[in-house]
Structures are given as C-alpha cells and as structure tokens.
Amino acid sequence: MNSHPYNPISQFYQSQFGEKVYKISVSVADTCPNREGLRGMKTCNFCDQWGSAAYHKNLEQPLRAQIEKVRSILKEKRKANKFLIYFQAYTTTFQKVHKLREEIAIALEYEDVVGVVIGTRPDCISDALLDLWNETAEKVFVAVELGVQSFDEEELVWMRRGHTGKQSLRAIQKISKNCPKVNLGIHLIFGLPGETEESVRDTAKICNDLPIHNVKIHNLHILKNTPLEEEFREGRFQPMDRETYFNHVTTFIRHLRPDMVVHRLSAYAPRWNELVAPEWTAHKMKTYQDMMDHLSENGFQQGDLYS
Ligand code: SF4
C-alpha cells in the first residue's frame, strides 16, 4: 500500500499512463430508460433533471466543442498532456450503438486523448456494445463505469432504479467475460435508509468476489426538484449524518480487497445551489480531508480487515 489509506484512481492512472491524466466529462445522451418510462420505470429518486451530468450546458454544444473547451483550459492551467473522455450524463448506451461508435471516433481524433470512459446502467448492455468496447480497447484504454448503486433489492426499489441487483451481477460477469481488456468499475451509493455497518461490510465482500477493477462511492444527497426532495420535505427521508457516513465508508474500505482501485469516497453536488441536504456535503475539500484524516489518524488502511 502507499501513503494513501486507500488505493486511489490517481495512482492507477499514473502507473497506467506514466503521468497525471485528466478526465473530460461530456454529454451525448439526453435520456435514459427511467426517464422514458420503459417497463413502467420512473426517474431515480435522487436524480436531477440533468441526469447526473457534471456540466449541464454540455448538451447544447457539439461533442468536439465540449472536448476542446475543457481540453484547452486544462492544457493552459494545469499543463495537462493526457486526457480521458468521460461519457457521463444520463445513460450513454441508451442510444444506437453506431452513434456511440461515431462519438468515440470523435473523441479519439485528439492525439492526447488516451482513452474513453463510458458510464452506463446494468440493463443497457448489448452484444453489439460489447463488440464496440472490444474493438476500441484494441486501440486505447477503455473503462466502463456501471451504475450499480446497491446490491440490495429493497434499496434499489426505494431508489426507483428500475434494475435489480441480480441484473448488476449478471452484467458485471458478462462484461468481464466478453471484454477482458475493459477496465470495469461500479458506482455505489452510501447513506441509504436502513444502511448499517454490517450491510456496507457485506457490500465490500460482494465487490471483493467480483471481476471488477474499481469502485466509486457517492453519498446520497438531496438535490432540488427531485422525488427525494419531496420525501425529505414530507419527513419521510433523513440524510445520513457526517459521522455515520464516515464510519460506513471506513468499514467498507477496511474490508475491501487491497488491489481494488477507489475513485472517491464521497460525492458533491455539481451545481452547489441545487443541494438541499445534507449541508456537510457542500464542503467538498473539507469533507475529503476530514475523511482522510479520520482514516490516517486511526491507522486504518484499505483491506486491513480483508480476508
Ligand atoms: S440516475 Fe441515471 S438512470 Fe437514474 S434517472 Fe438519472 S439518468 Fe436516469
């Protein structure tokens, strides 16, 4: 292990690419199965109208303009040399595969783009998509980030995800088996109702047994104009307090296998004025630093309880 109490993605990128790599988030999709009401599905209870996009004005611009704008800022301000294009908003694979193929081709027109990252859902994985990922992975780095959020069926129903934990497990196995060169990660949400130290430990154990390379942890926060805001206002949902969240993340990290790469330990609202609660998540750097201090001061390390 390293000086970090966990195995950070920055270190993985450094070893993979020999230097710091910057992600450029782009939006090409503008909907998802939930928003389309497929099979009676509804918008996830935590999702705002921007579909989890970091920068909501992206969709108004062509893909090349989205890439070039951020790329030139990063080149100038951070002296960045290498980039990954992150297809983030809504469900990128909920569109024709040939369209995604064209979008990936545009992303790879830039010689300093060393790969692509595709965010999607476990129930939007077709064989044609796997072929596209394999084909792309022959040329550049390809990462897939699956929005699993939880393996608990009740929690998934509560979030209105519209897919099951079993579907997530099947999708993970399918991608891993058919796309051996794809770097596979999952997103998890902590701070759900009924979550306990035992349940997050069990989640770590499930992750340890899966053929995945990384995990990204989000804390459940309430954004304006979401179904979750309504639940909160009506007193049917209380966000997790900071201390409990830290304890849950700590338990998860300590039970996680040491080689698993971790993207981050908490999320923050990309549009800060849309955050309703909890207030502590508004302080991105402080929350991160306090969590690192909590791990370091107690001598906790990723995997120190892994068996
Ligand atoms: S979180 Fe993703 S799948 Fe859920 S409603 Fe938002 S864009 Fe759709």
Image (cartoon, rainbow, N blue to C red):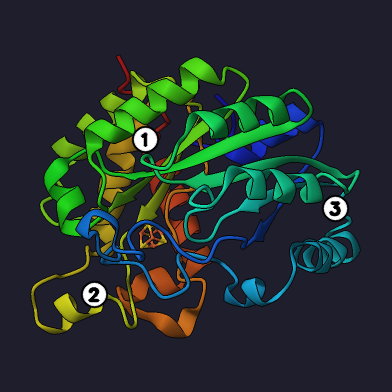
> In percent of the image, x 32 and y 34: which residue is there?
168
Q: Which mark is residue 295?
A: none
**Disc 3: which residue:** 80
Q: Check disc 1 and report its element: helix, strand or loop.
A: helix
**Disc 2: which residue:** 227
Q: Is residue 37 left or right of residue 117?
A: left
- Residue 62 or residue 276, whichever sits in front: 62
Question: How many numbered discs?
Answer: 3
Q: The disc labelled 3 sits on which kind of residue? A: Ala
Would the CB of label 2 be found within 8 Å of ligand 1?
Answer: no
Image position of 257 with respect to 191: above or below: above
Asked whether the residues under the numbered discs 2 and 1 touch, taking CB atoms below 8 Å apart as contact, a structural biologist would say: no
> In percent of the image, x 47 and y 46: which residue is there?
120
Mark 2 vs mark 1, foreground winner is 2
Residue 32: x, y in percent? 42, 59
Would the CB of label 1 be found within 8 Å of ligand 1?
Answer: no
Image position of 237 with respect to 275: above or below: above
- Of the image marks 2 and 1, the number of the one nearer the N terminus: 2
Q: The disc labelled 2 sits on which kind of residue? A: Pro
- Residue 166 or residue 74, whichever sits in front: 166
- Of the image marks 3 and 1, the number of the one nearer the N terminus: 3
Which image quadrant shows ligand 1? bottom left
Residue 143: x, y in percent? 60, 35
Residue 39: x, y in percent? 23, 54
Q: Quadrant of the C terminus?
A: top left
Q: Residues within 10 Å of mark 3 (few under 14, many from 20)?
A: some
> In percent of the image, x 38 and y 30: which residue is there?
171
**Disc 1: which residue:** 253
Q: Is residue 301 left or right of residue 116?
A: left
- Of the image marks 2 and 3, the number of the one nearer the N terminus: 3
Q: Note whether residue 257 is visible.
A: no
Q: The disc labelled 1 sits on which kind of residue? A: Ile
